[in-house]
Structures are given as C-alpha cells and as structure tokens.
Image (spheres, rainbow, N blue to C red):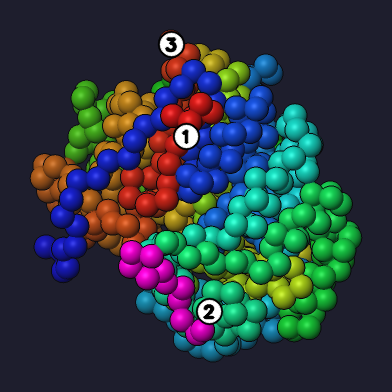
Amino acid sequence: MLEHLVQNWNVRKPLARSRGGIIATQNRIAGEAGASVLAAGGNAVDAAVATGFALAAVEPWNSGLGGVGFMLVYLAKQNRVEVVDFGPLSPRGLNPADYPLTGGNTTDLFTWPTVQDDRNVHGPMSIAVPGHVDGLGLALEKFGTIKFADAMQPAIKLADEGMAIDWFVTLKVATMAKELARYPTTRDIWLPGGFPPVTAAGAPLGRLQLTGLAATMRRLADAGYRDYYEGEIAASIAADIKAMGGNLAAGDLRNYRARIVAPIETEYHGAQLALAPHLTAGPSMLRALGGLRDLKFRQGGPHADAFLAYPKTLREAYTERLQTMGETSDHRDPSTTTHLNVIDRNGNMVALTQTLLSVFGSKVVLPSTGILMNNGIMWFDPRPDSPNALAPAKRALTNMCPVIARRDGKPWFAIGASGGRKIFPAVYQISSFLIDHGMTLEDAFHQPRIDASGGDSVGLDPRLPQETQQALAQKYPVNLTELVVYPTNFACPSAVLNDPKTGEHFGIADVMSPWSGAVSQDGK
C-alpha cells in the first residue's frame, strides 16, 4: 500500500507531429524559441543551441551559462553521429584535503560521506569548470548554419522579459529557499523580501528579473562565446569566485575546451544506437542492453516478462558502474537537469542534456554576471582511492544519457531525460518500448515504468497491471511509487521520432512535467 496516495487523475501530454522540424523539451517556451529557428530555415543544431541558451532564462535552476552537458548530433547527409562533450572538470587549484569528511553519512545507499560544511554540495567550493557556453558554441561552429549572435537572441529576449511567476516557480523556489538564502546575490534575486516569489490569485503574472543575466548574454553575443573563457566575462567570473573563497580560477576557464568525440554504438534488435561515451550513463546503458539482447518478449507488451528483465539488467549495470566508475546521489540536494531533442526537415537530429547538477546548482549566483553556477564537485567521491575520487583537473562521472537511434540506415529517434540516477533507467525502458514492443512514441511515453536505479527495492508505478506488480514482488523488494508532478520519481524524459516509412516527424515530452512540451516549426 502507498503510505500517502496523492494522485487522482489521468494525465496525457499532447504529441507534436509535422513533416518539418520538431523540438521536444522540458520548457515549451524555450522550445518555441528553437522552433522559430527551425521555421526560419535553421537546422537541428541551430535550434538546439538557441533553446539551450533560452533555458537559462526560463528554467534556470536546471541548466544555464554556469552548467555542463553532452550533445549528440546526427548528421543526415553523412549518416553518422558526433558527440559534443562539455562535461564537468574540477579546478586545477582544488585540494582534496579542503573537503574533510565529518564521519557522517546519509541513509541513501549511493550518497557520499558527508563533507565538512557540505562544501562539495553548495557554495563556491562546489563549482566545477562550466562547459555549457563552450559546448554550445562549438556545436554551432562545427554543425550549425547560423551565427552565434543570432542563436543568442531568443535567450536575450526572454532574459529581458524576466520569468513569469507561476505556481511552479513558487514551488521550485520554496523547496530550496533555505539553501538559496545562504548567498546574498542569490537571495536578493530568488527570495524578494525574504520569501519565495508569488503572484496573487487572480492577478496578472508577476515577473522575476534574473539580475545581470541579460547583460551577460548580450556581451556573449557581441564578443563571442570564448569571451566566457578568455575575455571580460571570464575575468568577472574568476574575480567573483576568488572573492568568495572558491577554487575556480582564470586559468581553469582559459584552458577549458569542449571536445568532439565519437559515440559508443551498438546494434540492438534491429536498431543502431549511438550513446554518449566516457563518464556518462552511456556505457551503463550499453551494458544493460546487452542483458536483453538474447531475450524474446511476449507480443503485445510490455508484459511482466519485460518488467522482470529490466531490473535484473539494470542492477547488473549499476553494480558494474559502482565498482568501476563511481556514482552519486544525495537526498539533501535533489539532482536536476534538463534535456531537449530536435529533428529538422532534413532528418538531422540532436539529443542534448545540460545541467547544473543539483536544483539551483551551487546556489551561488555570481554578482558581476548574474550567472547561476553548477555544483559539479558533488559528482566526485570525496573518499580517496575510488574510481571517481575527488582530485584536481579531473573529469567527473555523470548520469547524463542522451541517445540517438537509427533503423535501416535512417534516423529513427532521439531521446534523453533529466532526473539524476533515474535518467538511465527511464531512457532504457522507453527505448525498449519502442524497439522491442513496437509502441508508438505517444504510447511509450504514457506507459507506466519501474525505477531500478539503485538500492535494494524496485519502484513500481501503481498503474502497472497487477500481474506485473505481483511478478516483480515475488522476485524483488518493491515499493509503490506514484508518477507525480513533484518530486520526479521516474525521471523527466523527452523524445523526437522520425517514421522512416512516411517521413512524418513526432515529438513528446514528460507527461507530468507542467512546463514540458513538443512543438513543430509550424507551431503545432
């Protein structure tokens, strides 16, 4: 039995469809900015970059100029996938001795031992070198068709307007109010008058101004994206962090370079999957898919046989991940990310995951630039001698899992999610729904899932058939876990899909996320 039953509705998310371009994202306002780029003739990368920057103005607690990420790009003419890696890197001046363990620990199986003052979780010492601006700039330079300054314009416009203060803004700020109040600039922006922003019932929506952000975006548009790392913006970032006692320095920014790397690829039940490599969830998903390769599921599913196979393969993948790569989760500071997908009229596709790591990242807004910084140091294990141990100038293990699938040499779908360690199980199951069970994109996203992202028990969506629930309960410790608006119990996925037979494109976003949506270049 659920201890507290809260959901009493059936929710569906609309499917976007078009023969032109489609973008699916966690924030439809940002998605509309990308769709306008597609409508103006831009390609999938142009739209993804414009949307990626726009998200900094309309969904700032998830990602932004102070964040990191990974982008998969499918190039239709060349029929190949490239990966833009702008993942987290620890500062060169970081000293692991500055993060002493206090002897405490949290109850979650995969949390790190507690560090003194939680300085790896929030504050200036939690900030990793941000790759977001360089990654999106590099992607546009290599694979886009529009100028960087033009890609910045939708974000600048949205930053000028300020965030509309709806109930979801109030909720997100209220859940982090105690932490946001620690840092003066952050407090001044996000807690006006000392309280979460609220629009009075029946009144026109108020606007929250993210002080300094629009000006910083204008500077980037005028000076170019490397100004963030080598110019006026870089100097401001380094000076602010130094004044706060952080490790990130001008040299870390100057030396940072996003990189283009090859994906890891695999053939799975007639589909060719390209996944992010290295310190992402891509290798773990590859391992889990291998566990399904020789299985034949009952037709018309997914049925209980599939849901019995999913936790087994996920557990094996997580065991390998923990032993060889490391892992992180922390219930003191919920993980957050954002993911978006684009397909254009020519079949080019993008799967882009970008993040600050925790909700509101480090909780530090830099006073000179208005940039909300990541807390990427929390990705590292503070214990020495582990595969993912905290160290200077080191790349961290992340949970991001963007995927691009092809079938018969044609683009099929691009998918990813936000939600910390729940990302990979969600992407894995939905991919299986599409590949193994022949589900439509709409049905796959409305299909209840399980969560087997670590720990002894398996989380069950109560909407799963009783046959499936009983079969899982006989084999695993289970707990009923509702699909609700908050918290994100089953990740927050989105996807676009091409029907190779008809050439029609589809897009859909997370069912329970209030702001998510898919929109086509013609606004449908």
- At label 2, which amino acid type do we have? Pro
Image location of residue 350, percent across then percent down: 59, 34
Q: Is residue 199 magenta?
A: yes
Q: Is residue 481 magenta?
A: no
Q: Which residue is mark 1?
A: 519
User: Residues in magenta?
Assistant: 193-203
Task: Farthest residue to the front: give it.
Answer: 203
Q: Main secondary structure of the magenta part?
A: loop
User: Who's the residue at 50% across and 74% down the image?
Assistant: 112
User: Who's the residue at 26% across and 28% down the image?
Assistant: 297
Image location of residue 108, percent across then percent down: 38, 72
Residues 351 and 200: in front is: 200
- Which part of the image, by quadrant, shows the C terminus? top left
Q: Quadrant of residue 215?
A: bottom right
- Disc on the earlier residue, 3 or 2: 2
Q: Which residue is mark 3?
A: 502
Image location of residue 65, percent across then percent down: 68, 58
